[in-house]
Each structure stands twice: as C-alpha cells, then as structure tokens.
Amino acid sequence: MVLDTYFLLDGQVKLVTSAADGHEKIVDILQGGDLFAEAVAFLGYRYPVQAIAAMPSRVLEIPLTIFLVTLQQHQELMLQMLGRLSLRLRHLIMELRHLTVESADQRVAGYLLELCPSGNSPVSLLLPAKKAMIAARLGLTPETFSRVLKRLREEHLIAVEKLKIYIHRPSELRQWANSKSSTR
C-alpha cells in the first residue's frame, strides 16, 4: 500500500480522532506551511487521525515516491525533515505530560507561554485558532478554558480581546502556573 504525504499551503487543518464515546479529540492544529502524514507514509500505515479543514484551506498531496526521490536528491531537506520529526516527537512527549500530569491552569498558561518569544517583555499574541479548538487541543472544555482565562485576567497576568492575548509579564505567568502544580 503506497500512502502520500501532505503539505498545507494555507488555511488551517485540525487533526482529530474519535473517542469511544463518539466525541472528537483534536490531536493537533496545523497552519499553512505544515507538512503532515510523512511519518506514517514511511511506515506504510494508514494515518491514525482525520484531517479536517477548520477554515478554507489548500492542501498539496505529495505522492510518497516523489517525496522519497526529492529527499534522496536534497539531503539538506531530509535533515530538516528529520529535525521536524524529532521536534514533533518531543512535542508529543510534552503533550502527554501536559494531559496526564498538569492541571487545567497549567495547561492553559503553558500553552500561552509556548506562543511567547523568550524573555520577560510584555507580549501581544494572536491565538492561532478559535478558543474552542484550543480548549479541545488542551483536553479541556471551552468553559474550563474560559474560566482559566478569567482567572488569569483577575490575577492581572493577561488581558484578552477576542483572539488577542496580552501577557503583561511572562515570568509571572510561568510562576503562577508552577504554583498551580499542587492544586490539581
């Protein structure tokens, strides 16, 4: 069985799987420029999740044979892809930790901090997806996600305007999240 890999040219795609109770679990949210299904294509497996456009999107299907020839001809591209796969594996390990060990407060704060550049300067960022999709990605209900954002606002750690988040002092948000570890 020959499988293909895909490149998201633009738009947004959510990778989802269904739970035993029929509920949808968002595994990842892809943005324009993301490559997906390459790891399972190498192994000859079917992709274990569904890719669903979250907004109008354009996806390029790359036949595996063409993808492999391109990687063989361009070693720097192969090394970049191996780097991406390694980062993805690290991200999934961290994600497992987040979902099994951390409280809702820690997950939301950690997610916001992942979007921040390093340093402690005030940061204004635009959430990359709708709040309900981010909540699902973090293993939370939209209501829980909203309650955590409200607590963060009440603590004067962030300001929220629709999908725009202003983080006053990232180091204080990090300290606040660390203090929540005993409240799970």
Image (spheres, rainbow, N blue to C red):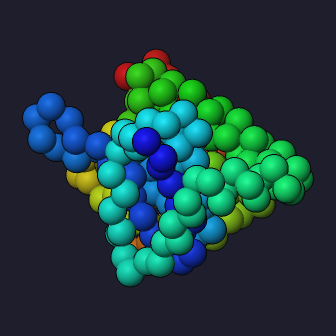
Q: In this view, does 30 lie above or below 17?
A: below
Question: Residue at coordinates 59% horizontally, 58% vertically from top-left?
Answer: 35
Extreme residue toward the left, this view: 21
Question: Residue at coordinates 45% horizontally, 21% vertically from top-left?
Answer: 101
Number of numbered callouts drawn: 0
**Residue 168 in the figure: left or right of residue 5:** right
The answer to whether residue 28 is seen in the rendering is yes
In percent of width and height, residue 47 lies at 40, 43
The answer to whether residue 112 is seen in the rendering is no
**Residue 53 in the figure: left or right of residue 23:** right
Q: Classify the position of the N terminus by image quarter.
A: top left
**Residue 104 in the figure: left or right of residue 6:** left
Closer to us: 120 or 116:
116
Q: In this view, does 99 lie above or below 148?
A: above
In percent of width and height, residue 19 lies at 20, 35
Q: Based on the displayed image, in which of its 4 quarters is residue 55 positioned? A: bottom left
In percent of width and height, residue 14 lies at 39, 58
Closer to us: 80 or 24:
80
**Residue 45 in the figure: left or right of residue 36:** left
Closer to us: 40 or 126:
40
Question: Residue at coordinates 33% horizontally, 62% vertically from top-left?
Answer: 52
Question: Residue at coordinates 58% horizontally, 53% vertically from top-left?
Answer: 64
Q: Classify the position of the C terminus by image quarter.
A: top left
In percent of width and height, residue 40 lies at 51, 39
